[in-house]
Image (tube, rainbow, N blue to C red):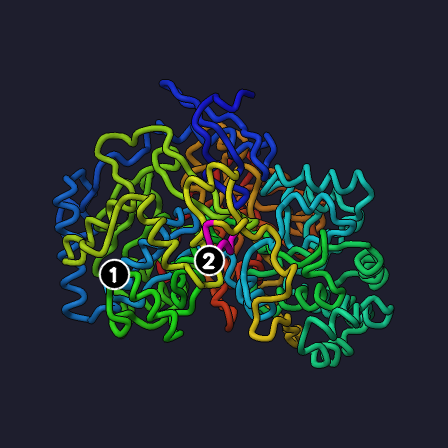
Amino acid sequence: MSRAAGVASHCPYCSLQCGIRLTGGAEPGVLADDFPTNRGGLCVKGWAASELLGHPDRLLSPLVRERAGDRDSPLRPSTWDEAFDRVVAAVRRSQRRHGPDSVGCFGGGGLTNEKAYLLGKFARVGLRSSAIDYNGRFCMASAATAGNRAFGVDRGLPFPLADLADTRALMLVGANPAETMPPVVRYLEQGRASGARHIVVDPRRTATAARADLHLQPAPGTDLALANGMLHIALRAGYVDTEYVARLTTGFDAVRSAVAGYWPDRVERITGVPADLIRQAVRILGEAESAMVLTARGAEQHSNGTDTAQAFVNLALALGLPGRPSSGYGTVTGQGNGQGGREHGLKADQLPGYRRLDDPAARAHIAKVWGVDPADLPWPGRSAYEMLDHIGSDGGVRALLVFGSNVIVSAPNTSRVLNRLRALDFLVVTDIFLSETAAEADVVLPTTQWAEEDGTLTNVEGRVIRRRRALPPPAGVRDDLWILTELARRLGRGRLFDADPRRVFDELRRASAGGVADYSGITYDRIDAEQGVFWPCPAPGHPGTPRLFDDGFPTPDGRARFVRVEHRNPAEVPDGEYPYVLTTGRSMQHYQSGTQTRRSPTLVAAVPEPYVELHPDLARLHGIGDGDLVELRTRRGKAVFRARLTDHLRPDTLFVPFHWGGANVLTNPALDRRSGMPAFKVCAVVVSRAGGPADPVPSPAPEEN
């Protein structure tokens, strides 16, 4: 393919941010580009991305309620002035009655770095509110917390994706890139073709697990016990790199003491994984010349997700992997800019550059860049689900602005979330389509799509890349930077804001300077010339940092930290009333809450409706056939799915993709005490037949609770 064909940009979906070129004309099309992450490959979502650009469901003007303040009245088109007047009046009214923190912002992991940065600034400077978080809290928070504790830094992969092809042993824990990130498979296959051995840890025999040399199939919620058991075996077998541990780490004695109790037979009883297979996995990692351990949401979306990720970090450190060539620990970021969002201020406790909001020096630095008094900056607020759960309560949010997130589908226990959203005095949603969340709003603001805007994103490797505008937006549609700047102007803070993406990025560079995630040496021109730049990059002449930890760890003493962690049962376990385990995840054809992919003709044709995977033995027990309707019920609600019978998962476990509204009606909002991550991956469920193959799947309808 000619590199001159089309406008170079990136796929709008996952954290790979595959290089693409968008061709022009009446019907724009997508061509795969030879970018370092995907090397000309794309998944079906990437190929179909252009189908949404001219979609008839596209929002083309602001919408407001026919009767202001009455969300039972219909939405109608309005002018931007009318919509902004309503928003500004609601913000002022709420803050006058209930204080600055009564107005909150909820962002999305698909927002560009510029949007994420400006939304964080808008919350803290435009609104002077502590109430901001984003849906990345539901994705990366546990691994990020573990990484910061161990390494002093959180970057999904501390090495380029291409290194996956060079490592001699790879263990993927709760990750299924063959379906969720198909272009990654070429690196895995290159490695296996040259003799690498792969281990997959997953309750399901996924497409990734089917390609592996060894598949460990633990009960959901028992990964921490497995990791501790593996370290126990590594100690007994002599695989621990004692020289590395002594020279580059601290805290190992406490961890060694903890894992002494995780002997193989005990771990087999906890996890269901045969002890011989656990020993085999340790042997593969321990005897390899180089090795990697990668975790993803399957290991992390638990009420003990931070400790689970920490246990695998401990294993990697004990084997001496981080900082060695073609080796290390990493976590597979999910959302397109989940990495950049948490680096530049979308999380409740962070400031740009991955600075802590409660650090006086960080507050002083950012306040100087923003032109405000450090004393005027709010302090850390509540995490994502906590903010949603406290809506309408004393000290809770009363007016909420949502940018790029569909929380009625993506948050756990969505019936409760719906109840809380309806308790708001005012809800504003900015989106490209009328999502389930937007349909509840007082005001809906139409925004640009990926092909209609400029900006940067930070992919799974920590590579900062550029999204380039290829098409003008429809008349009447504005981008989020303009929306935020205009709102700030009408709230009397406009002089502190700018809507130009390049100037916003230049301010982000200054704000990040000296921080852990230092972008100060990265420019649009460098990104264009170098196919992206890896952070940290602290000066214009700095080459960027493709591989972290080559020279030690960014901790006060330069050492990585072992952290003692112990297995504990999931927050909810099966019992006589709810005898099975429900776990959730993604499918190849859909993405996140499905706001985009459920409108793509190609993707809907492939997977048109929500489904549940269950084992034939479990189905037989309940009189369920392949294609039947199945009702799943948990302590929070119920939903109906199409049955898919498969022996690829444990007989006691059911799997549901979360791209439709029904899945998270069921999930448990129990939070990880360190990261605020909800327990998406384990809850107790009961199953029953609800209809036959000819019956349609009813639309999910969360009931308020």
Within 10 Å of disc 2 (Cα), the crowding (few <14, some 14-19, many 20+) is: many
Q: Say whether residue 138 is left or right of residue 60.
A: right
Within 10 Å of disc 1 (Cα), the crowding (few <14, some 14-19, many 20+) is: some
Give the residue pinned by disc 2: 518
- In the image, what residue occupies the spot 78% across and 66% down? 268
- Residue 340: where, in percent of width, then height? 45, 53
Of 529 and 343, the residue lying toward us: 529
Write down the region rendered in magenta.
535-540
Q: What kind of residue is marked 2?
A: Asp
The dominant secondary structure in magenta is: loop
Give the residue pinned by disc 1: 424
- Residue 194: where, in percent of width, then height? 81, 40
> Which sits earlier in the primary sequence, circle 1 or circle 2?
1
Of 553 and 471, the residue lying toward us: 553
- In the image, what residue occupies the spot 31% across and 53% down? 118
Q: Give the Cα distance between marks 1 and 2.
A: 37 Å
Residue 19 at least partly seen: yes
- Residue 334: where, in percent of width, then height? 53, 50
Seen in the picture, residue 302 relative to 490 is either above or below; the reply is below
Marks 1, 2: nearer the viewer? 2
Residue extending farthest to the front is 541
Q: What kind of residue is marked 1?
A: Leu
